[in-house]
Each structure stands twice: as C-alpha cells, then as structure tokens.
Amino acid sequence: RVDAAYNLSYANNLLAYGTYSRDETPQPVPDSYRAPGYPLFLAAVIKLSEALSVDSDKFIVFCQALLGVGTLLICYLLAKTFLPGFWALLPPGLVAISPHLVSSGSYVLSETLFGFTLILALYALVRAVTSGRSMDWFYSGVFFGLAYLVNPVSLFLAPLLAAFLAFCARRESTGDDKRKVYVRHIVVFVVPLVVVVACWSMRSAI
C-alpha cells in the first residue's frame, strides 16, 4: 500500500504542480526516489480518465488489464520466432494462468507495465537480430530505455545482451564487413538506453 500511495502521489503532483515528487505538501519538492516511468503512466491514465469522465481508479485497472493482454500477445509473437506450430501457444498460455500476472493488474504497482515494456523490448531485439534493420535495433534500445524508466533493475540486461551478441558476431564465419555492420547495429541498440540513463541521472543530480 505504501508503494501504491507513493506512485499516486508522484502522478498527482505531476498533474497538479508539474513536479515529480512524492511530497504531499502544497509546495512539493522534486525528488528522484523512484523511477519516473510508472508515475508518468499513471498521470497520463488519470488525465485521460478525466477527459472521458470515468472513474480514474477503475480506468487504471482497465488500462493495466489491456497491458496484461498485450503482454500475452507479444509473448505469443516472441514464442512464434523459435517454437513451431501450436507449441507457440504454450508460453503465453502459461503466462495467462500466472497468478502474479492475473492479480498484479489490480494494484497500483509497476509490475504490469514493467513486464509489458520488458517483453516488448525482448521481442524488438529478436526482430532486430532476424531482420538486420538498423531501425529495429534502435527501437529495441528505446524499449529497453522505457523498461529502465519503469524499473531500473533492468539496466544491465541490455548491455549483457549486447555483449553476448557481439561475442556471437565475432565467432561468426562471415566477412569483416558483415561483422562491422553487426557491431554497428549493437551500438545503435545500446545508445538509446545510454541516453535515457544519462538524462535521468543528470535530472536526479540537478
């Protein structure tokens, strides 16, 4: 309940004062105690609920239910890349009956949004590896940056994946030019995350 209250305090202060803070005084002092991704999501949802004249609490739960459905869909698309036929239905099926996924959407906590952004980033990375398009690599890096803004615990996942992919590229028997292109793609993948982390760190320091 304390975490949920803090999240709502951040969202309400953003809407009322334009200040990112959990302070509940009339003049909230900016802080960086929590990552901004989920409170920004809450602020947007609350603002939209006001525009639609619907109850904000119920609308938050509704939007998080949509994120849960989106997680299942992306999980299926991800599974299709390496599982044949009906086997691709197994991972999203297991996710769908996960008690954590079923219950977490009804709480004002970041887990639902974090799971969605993280699996979206992983799917985008798989698409990038298979397509070889620079923009797919860039999109994957952006999604990993969004996942970091929701929960900074994901910070090291993208660099570890980049290091693994660079190692695989080095071991491939392709020519030097192709290896250089692959390494360049990995750089394009990492740069958005570095920019996001640097901007948030700079804001926190200021």
Image (spheres, helix red, strand yellow):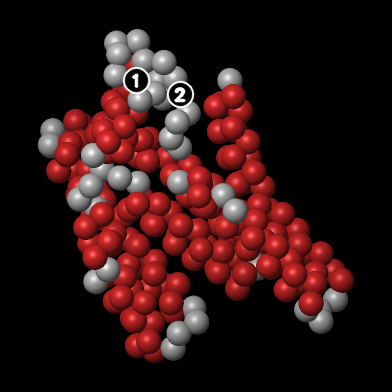
**Residue drawn at x 32%, y 67% as measured from the top left:** 72
In the image, what residue type sits under mark 2?
Answer: Asp
Is residue 44 visible from the viewing direction of this image?
A: no
Residue 188 in percent (x, y) is at: 68, 53
Quarter in which the C terminus is drawn: top right
Q: Residue 23 — which label?
A: 1
Is residue 78 visible from the viewing direction of this image?
A: yes
Q: Circle 2 is placed at which residue position?
A: 31
- Left or right: 19 in relation to 96: right
Asked where in the image residue 87 lies, by quadrant, the reply is bottom left
Label 1–label 2 contact, CB within 8 A: yes
As helix, strand or loop, the secondary structure at mark 1 comes to loop
- Nearer the N terminus, badge 1 or badge 2? 1
**Residue drawn at x 63%, y 63% as measured from the top left:** 161
**Residue drawn at x 78%, y 79% as measured from the top left:** 172
Residue 163 in percent (x, y) is at: 70, 62
